[in-house]
Image: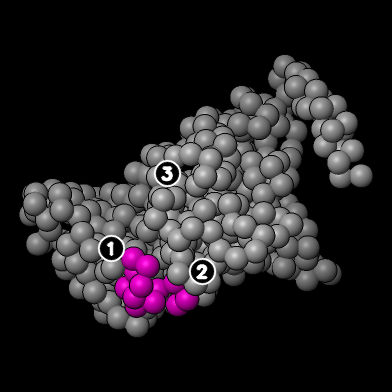
Amino acid sequence: MAEFYKTVTEPFLRDLRDLPIPEGVYVAEYVWLDGGYKLRSKSRTLYKSYAKAEDYPKWNYDGSSCGQAPGEDSEVILYPRACYWDPFRGKPNVLVMCDTYTPQGEPLPTNSRVKCAKVMDEAMAMGLEPWFGIEQEFFMMDKASGKPLGFPKHGQPEPQGPYYCGVGALYMEGRAISDAHYRACLYAGLKISGTNAEVAPGQWEYQIGPTVGMETGDMVWMARYLMERIAEKCDVVINSEPKPVKGDWNGSGAHTNFSTKPMREPGGLEGHIIPALERLSKKHAEHIAAYGAGNEARLTGRHETASYKIFKWGRADRGASCRVGHETMKEGFGYFEDRRPAGSMDPYVVSGMIVSTCCDIPM
């Protein structure tokens, strides 16, 4: 039946997807996070376009099916927050990133965006202009075997070394998915700055940024949504867990590059970056606890990580908790990289915590 679906039904469905939508009709795909911080979405027909995300109508869904509400009072309200072009349906159809509220207007406990927005708004009001660049690592997994693409059915592939930014059929798996995702992000209007193969077969990375304030979390979540949708079409599972492959393989992180306006100006290294790193050192345990479940398996002190038990920063040191690049050290201003967040981290939580700690803004 599965083979019949692929060979006969899919071309028919593809033809239907190519049918034009009547003029003046728009489809908005509302996207949100469920109670386990997994992505969900559903489609809505609209008869007018809107200038801003906040102008889109609120909507609702069954929270009891998403682990966010009891069955006897299951309605959860979606508040539109950010809007992007839909690469699957094409313009003028849109993807709408939402957060979640009770019918009384209270944010759900799982709505991590609210606290992040409060911190970012205050930082922007102070003229700090927090910038981020998120390096999202992940594995593409074969659904049948549960192994990364390129791993043999039995045993292990050649040790890591030739895969990072590699070329050729002997080492590369999943490039078509990565390239399709890159184009989809650009079409949608996401600030994706690049992509590359990582150190293990089937492991890839894309970079979202530079983004400012709340753009960060919204765009990272939407980029993840696009990747899931594209991989779904290819029957491939996306895994962003911090250590999905045991043994002598790197885990998956979400290295978070950060700066404020004062950090990017002359004197920023001594006056703002190093003091920020000192603040981070004092709240190391708090950040580790919020940087992704199971991250201890990745942050071992090996495979380009520092141990989760300690905090250290260094110049261009990929084995440090936070890394300050050569250019920043040379110029005396710039940015630093927090290498601790796991690939599965919530970008609302991580970006909000970094601004809160580094800029001394209560979260």
What residue is pinned by disc 1?
Answer: 318
What residue is pinned by disc 2?
Answer: 243
The answer to which of 188 and 183 lies nearer the viewer is 183
Q: Give the structural element (helix, strand or loop) at label 3.
A: loop
Q: Are marks 1 and 2 in contact (CB under 8 Å)?
A: no
Q: Amino acid at mark 1?
A: Arg
Q: Amino acid at mark 3?
A: Gly
Q: Residues within 10 Å of mark 3 (few under 14, many from 20)?
A: some
The quadrant where residue 47 appears: top right
Verify whether residue 296 appears in magenta.
yes
The answer to which of 98 and 2 lies nearer the viewer is 2
Q: Give the structural element (helix, strand or loop) at label 2.
A: loop
Q: Amino acid at mark 2?
A: Lys
Magenta segment boundaries in residue numbering: 295-307
Q: Residues within 10 Å of mark 1 (few under 14, many from 20)?
A: some
What residue is pinned by disc 3?
Answer: 166
What whole-number distance in Å separates the C-alpha atoms at marks 3 and 2?
22 Å
Which callout, 1 or 2, points at the residue further toward the start of the chain? 2
Point out the residue furthest to the bottom here: 309
Q: State whether residue 205 appears in this view.
A: no
